[in-house]
């Protein structure tokens, strides 16, 4: 598979996937201004190199929650991955394990917590979508604990389902009943169709199957997930989950310094500053823009991570300069696995590794601890001051 960068993987995935599936990955919400902003925000971050430093060896290992990972990036949770490539969740888990980086299994994954623990026991984290029925969430937390996973990630930025007009236009809705034009377009992607049919069609969300009382088929379970995951989630639940989960606990989707302070007060170990890849609130800023204020608020108390809009190793450098201790990607590895299966997932990680390495060399940074605000020039620095307490 010949891919030089993120965009090559994106194009390859686009060729292989029916439009309904590709749009599901690439799309944002409503006018997709947030999607454009996630990408353009990184263009505002210029990296200022320092020369005459010996960068003949460059160390991109990164410490996170007492572990040393080989690279400063990991794989963010993406629901329904098996729709894009059967077996994708565990391919991503395996690629992460082999590269010694973390993989976060989605709360809407198409493989189970127990499968994850078998595939990547030391690298797999679990992302929880809280359920309306509290017993379901509690049981999932118990399963992740029994499976020995090190880290639980609670996604908090889906208070209501978002308005994904691309999906609606393609007729991708619940229950899945695609219109004829979408089905005809899919016929232009015979390799994907053949695999989809061979593996039994719509993939199951197996983590939820035990809680479906009126049938275990894929559509019934998917409907259960849709109904359960509009649960009202509040700080009381964060406290409850914190008490139930004895290991590292991360909140994903925090964008405001006030929320970050509450995380710190409740004993949350890590925050993933994220706007869900611009898939929830279209008018949200890009996480890289709010990171400095969050860093100022809690950077010394909580481990800060970031995702959304990362498409180059240089983006990872910018995030580190502004206070991130780790960076995650969603679409980058998802395009890789959709386009090329396990080798595609590995290639995506390899491209990232190489770009980080080259950026470090170009910037005169022999290790990631060296990075700081002095390597960064922001287009309109006053933008980074927003939301700060006076
Ligand atoms: C197809 C797709 C499915 C996603 N599913 C989930 C999910 O189940 N849970 C979650 O917390 N985030 C989910 N996300 C958001 C990602 O975890 C991550 O925040 C986002 O993709 C980062 O932006 P990027 O794609 O620009 O790297 C999903 C993203 C995509 C593209």
Image (spheres, rainbow, N blue to C red):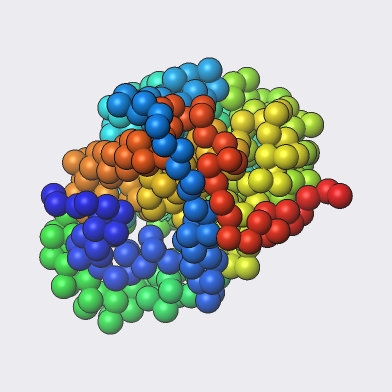
Q: Position of residue 2 (x, y in %)?
A: 14, 52
Look at 56% across and 51% down and name the residue there: 377
Q: Nearer the viewer, residue 10 or 202?
A: 10
State which quadrant residue 113 falls in: top left
Instruction: Examine the rendered structure and indicate whether residue 133 appears above or below residue 143.
Output: below
Q: Position of residue 191 (x, y in %)?
A: 13, 60
Look at 40% across and 32% down and name the residue there: 52
Q: Is residue 206 left or right of residue 28?
A: left
Furthest-right residue in this view? 390
State how many labels appear: 0
Q: Is residue 211 left or right of residue 217?
A: right
Q: Position of residue 352 (x, y in %)?
A: 33, 42
User: Is residue 216 visible in this depiction of the protein?
Assistant: no
Instruction: Examine the rendered structure and indicate whether residue 324 appears above or below residue 25.
Output: above
Q: Nearer the viewer, residue 314 or 153?
A: 314
Q: Nearer the viewer, residue 378 or 74?
A: 378
Q: Is residue 344 left or right of residue 243?
A: left
Look at 72% across and 35% down and name the residue there: 298
Q: Is residue 280 left or right of residue 56?
A: right
């Amino acid at each position: 598979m010949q891919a030089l960068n993120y965009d090559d993987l994106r194009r390859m995935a686009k060729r292989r996937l029916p439009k309904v599936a590709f749009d599901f990955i690439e799309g944002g919400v409503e006018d997709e201004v947030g999607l454009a902003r996630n990408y353009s925000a990184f263009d505002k971050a210029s990296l200022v190199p320092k020369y005459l430093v010996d960068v003949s060896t460059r160390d991109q290992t990164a410490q996170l929650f007492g572990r040393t990972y080989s690279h400063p990036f990991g794989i963010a949770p993406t629901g329904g991955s098996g729709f894009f490539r059967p077996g994708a969740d565990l391919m991503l888990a395996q690629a992460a394990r082999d590269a010694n980086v973390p993989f976060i299994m989605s709360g809407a994954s198409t493989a189970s917590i127990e499968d994850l623990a078998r595939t990547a026991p030391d690298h797999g984290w679990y992302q929880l979508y809280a359920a309306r029925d509290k017993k379901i969430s509690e049981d999932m937390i118990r399963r992740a604990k029994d499976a020995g996973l090190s880290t639980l990630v609670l996604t908090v930025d889906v208070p209501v389902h978002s308005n994904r007009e691309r999906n609606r236009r393609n007729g991708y809705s619940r229950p899945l009943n695609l219109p004829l034009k979408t089905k005809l377009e899919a016929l232009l992607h015979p390799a994907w169709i053949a695999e989809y049919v061979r593996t039994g069609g719509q993939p199951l969300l197996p983590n939820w199957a035990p809680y479906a009382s009126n049938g275990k088929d894929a559509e019934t379970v998917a409907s259960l997930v849709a109904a359960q995951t509009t649960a009202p989630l509040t700080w009381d639940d964060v406290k409850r989950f914190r008490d139930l989960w004895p290991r590292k606990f991360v909140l994903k989707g925090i964008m405001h310094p006030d929320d970050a302070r509450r995380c710190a007060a409740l004993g949350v170990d890590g925050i993933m500053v994220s706007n869900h890849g611009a898939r929830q609130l279209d008018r949200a800023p890009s996480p890289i823009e709010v990171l400095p204020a969050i860093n100022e608020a809690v950077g010394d108390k909580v481990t800060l991570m970031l995702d959304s809009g990362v498409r180059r190793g240089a983006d990872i450098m910018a995030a580190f300069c502004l206070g991130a201790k780790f960076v995650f990607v969603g679409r980058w590895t998802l395009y890789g696995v959709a386009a090329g299966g396990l080798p595609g997932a590995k290639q995506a990680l390899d491209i990232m590794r190489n770009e980080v390495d080259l950026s470090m060399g170009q910037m005169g940074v022999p290790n990631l601890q060296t990075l700081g605000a002095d390597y960064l020039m922001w287009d309109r620095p006053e933008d980074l001051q927003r939301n700060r307490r006076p």
